[in-house]
Amino acid sequence: MNEDLPARIRHAVASGLFAQAGDLWNEYAGEYADELRAGTAPPSRHADMHELVEWCRVATLAARAHAQDRWNALAASEKYLQPAPGGLSRIATSF
Amino acid sequence: MGSISNSLSSVTAPVTVAGSTGSTFMGASSYSTDLQSVITRAVSIANLPIQQLTNQQTALGDQSKELSTLDGLVAQLQTAVQDIDQAMRGSSFTATVSNSSLLSASVSDGAMEGNYSVEVKDIGSYATSMSAAKWGGISGPYTLWINGQSHNIATSDTSANGVAAAINSQYGGQVRATVVNVGGSTPDYRIALQATTLGKTILDIQDKNGASLQTAQTADTWGSQASYSVNGAAPVASNSRSVSISNGLTVTLLEASVGHPVNITVTRSTSALGNALGSFADAYNSVVNELSTQHGQSAGPLQGNPILSAIQSTLSQLGTYSNSTGAVNNLSSLGLELQMNGQITYNQFNLVAADIGNSSGVTSFLGSATGGGFLKSATDALNNLEQTGTGTLKNAEKDLQTQITNLGNTISTKQNQVANLQANLQQQMAAMDALIASMQQQSSYLTNMFQAQLAQSYAMAGR
């Protein structure tokens, strides 16, 4: 097992690189499965995996919530959108 | 408050992930339905300003269309004013001559009504010259002499026809040459010269040795100027029988009438002016009617636009124009009555009465497009609206078109931004969902494996 994988997965999630996090997770899950099959998984591995999954789930949900907040702010700005630039000309006459 | 551009541009880095197509999020986790609703809401919010801008663009398009309609009507009014000006010019004047066998008269722009007395003292004559002998046998080159000035006749054809043609071609502005057969059945071709203007002109053709080939001129063939007098004034000499005796009045002297002056009466046709004023009233009312559709309830798209005031001001200037001097001092004197509703009614009988009673007053009041009076005031006022480059109405149309173009560009830009935002958002959401789904699925699988192995370990330990 590449022991720095959990840290890299967390870093990718924290950076918003969810696709990269998914690739690293697949690598981690594969290696853990190999360990299980070989009977070489350390006793703490399963608890660590659960802890990692839960951390990633919460962090990802938090990221989605932030995205939603950003759009809520966008919605507010749209409601107060100013008219297009270059209003009608002021026409002066001197008849 | 953040601007739309800043908000939109904050999502820039696309995230590559499988599981999404088009605008529908196809994630597989238990969160996919919720994520899809977030995407839909976000896209619809981002589209709000585009809809707003599109509505604005439609409104500007309606304004532009209405402005174009008004522009056309004001242009028609401008044409109507020009037609009044034209009706006051030569085309509506008529010259009546008391004896048309003695002279004829024609009028053009600048003519004035009036009576003229013209006495034709002499209609003058053109100088002429004929070859002294049958043309031929004398080699060139030849020289044409006009009042002592020599002119080479450049031609290789030394026949009478050839020389005459060369003279006409090279000096036709001063003298005309023709070939005359004076021999009857035995041809005797000679060259006859005639000056193109009245008055004494010495004409000659000489051979290469300077010998004259023409008959010597006499007082009868020298030519003489025409002479005439206007309204009993001193006689005037002229090199032409067509003479201008006043601005826009030209007479052609046909026959001498010493002691018998010919009377010329120049009058202006009321009907031409009447028709022009009628067209003016129609054009004026068309603008008034169109303007009225932009005010009040169910007003048109230009409601509140300052251009309406500018046009209304111009109409007022035209409709209420007055001249403090003279009996004919406002449009009402000509039968154009400004009504309470802003329209003008036209009564041609008033014009006829004014024109008969005080024709010069009508002329003075109307003036001309460049000289003064109503026509200059109206022309200037309408030019202030219609002049390309400086006219208020033209500039308003141009500004509106610029706004529409700019708005179109803005909408296009925002549509692109929203499209990019949509794509990036879908990719990011899909990546989040894919990660969670993958973790859920594989952690379950691993937990099962772990528990199976644990159970196996317990079994082996118990054995």
Image (spheres, coloured by chain):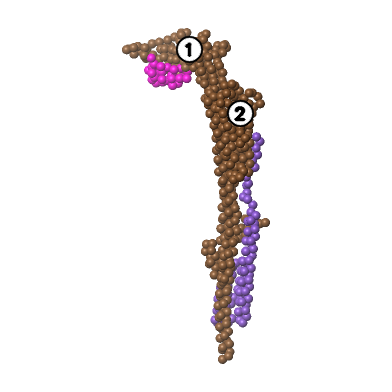
Quarter of the image where one finds residue B449: bottom right
Above or below, B163 against B345 in this view is above
Q: Give the chain letter for purple.
A: A
Quarter of the image where one finds residue A14: bottom right
Q: Chain of mark 2?
A: B
Asked if residue B115 can be seen in this view, the reply is yes
Q: Chain of mark 1?
A: B
Q: Position of residue B256 (x, y in %)?
A: 49, 11
Above or below, A79 against B82 in this view is below
Residue at 43% over, 19% down: B167
Q: Tell which of B132 and B93 is nearer to you.
A: B93
Above or below, A1 against B377 in this view is below
> Which residue in the protein does label 1 denote?
B255
Work out how far the residue at label 2 is from the one at label 1, CA to CA, in angstroms: 47 Å
Residue B332 is labelled as: 2
Q: Colour of chain B?
A: brown
Q: Position of residue B463 (x, y in %)?
A: 56, 91
Q: Tell which of B376 and B318 is nearer to you.
A: B318
Of the residues shown, which amino acid type is indicated by label 2? Answer: Ser
Magenta span of residues = B153-180
